[in-house]
Image (spheres, rainbow, N blue to C red):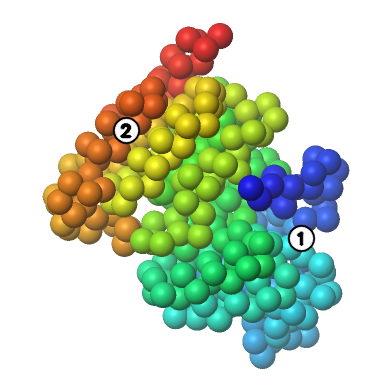
Amino acid sequence: MTDIFGILKGNSGESDYENKGVIVQGITGAYGSLHARNMMAYGTNIVAGVTPGKGGQKFEDKVPIYNTMQEAVDATNAKISIVYVPAKFFLGAAKEALEAGIKLLVAIPEHVPVRDTMEALALAKEKDAVIIGPNTPGIMIPELIKVGIMPPTPFKAGKIAVLSKSGTLLYEISDALTNAGFGQSITIGIGGDPINGTRLIDAFEMVKDTQDLEGMVVVGEIGGDSEEMLAQRIMDSGFNKPTVAYIAGRAAPKEKRMGHAGAIVMGTYGSAESKVSMFNKANIPVAKRPAEVPVLLAGKMEKSD
């Protein structure tokens, strides 16, 4: 499985961090420029931006802008890209990035056409690359690097991995963990579109063998079967680190989409009951409220000592 930590900060640790440059696709747009500034303020190493027709300019009088991803990658040797373009342009942007050599592509736009996402995923697989999203808040290693739109205040460096389908719940639950003394080793926003480049089960495989990992929090939601698949994989793998889950949308009416495009229950498929039952089978307690997550995690960690 892809070494996501290696892509983000280098296999030898933080000393390699400065080499982990990030390219921002759509850096001159209102959304892209806002979050590029926020990422730079956090310490993320933004090495280039790409906006067709604006090559030769500089963002914030510092970051060079290129017309194409190939030009940007050739100039910087960056392996990470974040995409801030409208959904209808996502496939073109993703293809350009992957064909230029990007190995981690963070896809911010939501409601990307399913066929476009699937085509981008096929190319990513061919190129041995990872796509986070679409419709993701991004990915971060707290106090080191953030590639996304998440606010910095809820997060603190630590040893708990947080995998979340929801952006706002990722922030809320991470804040609750931080206030309870549980920092995060990595947080990954899976994304809320029906098809995601990195599923919960994929994110689990990326982080489960992380050195110093002490526990994991899974933030799921109604719709699909990714939580059930993850619970089964956790059981099959013998993963024994303390793990707690939360499922959003328990009160949602059936066959009505709630929030994310993928958050819809059809009959019994994708129901909260199905997900809670499977997590319970895997000995993973499911919090009824976000604030309960650190309480349950503390209890699991005490039992594991």
Q: Residue at x 64, y 48 (%)?
A: 1
Q: Name the image quarter holding residue 153.
A: top right
Q: Residues within 10 Å of mark 1 (few under 14, many from 20)?
A: many
- Position of residue 9 measured from the top left corner of the image (x, y, whole percent): 75, 47
Q: Secondary structure at mark 2?
A: helix
Cα separation, mark 2 vs mark 1, equals: 40 Å
Closer to us: 305 or 154: 305
Q: Residue at x 60, y 67 (%)?
A: 124
Marks 2 and 1 in Cβ contact (< 8 Å) = no
Q: Name the image quarter holding residue 33.
A: bottom right
- Position of residue 202 measured from the top left corner of the image (x, y, whole percent): 53, 48
Mark 2 lies on residue: 278
- Position of residue 24 measured from the top left corner of the image (x, y, whole percent): 65, 69
Q: Residue furthest bottom?
A: 53
Query: Can residue 29 be seen here?
Result: no
Mark 1 belongs to which amino acid? Gly
Mark 2 belongs to which amino acid? Met
Count of picture labels: 2
Label 2 or label 1, whichever lies nearer to me, is 2
Q: Residues within 10 Å of mark 2 (few under 14, many from 20)?
A: some
Q: Residue at x 58, y 50 (%)?
A: 139
Q: Residue at x 65, y 62 (%)?
A: 129
Closer to us: 290 or 228: 228
Closer to us: 217 or 289: 217
Looking at the image, residue 52 sits to the left or right of residue 224; the answer is right
- Position of residue 98 measured from the top left corner of the image (x, y, whole percent): 65, 72
**Lower position in the chain sequence, tag 2 or tag 1:** 1
Query: Can residue 295 be seen here?
Result: yes
Q: Secondary structure at mark 1?
A: loop
Disc ID at residue 21: 1
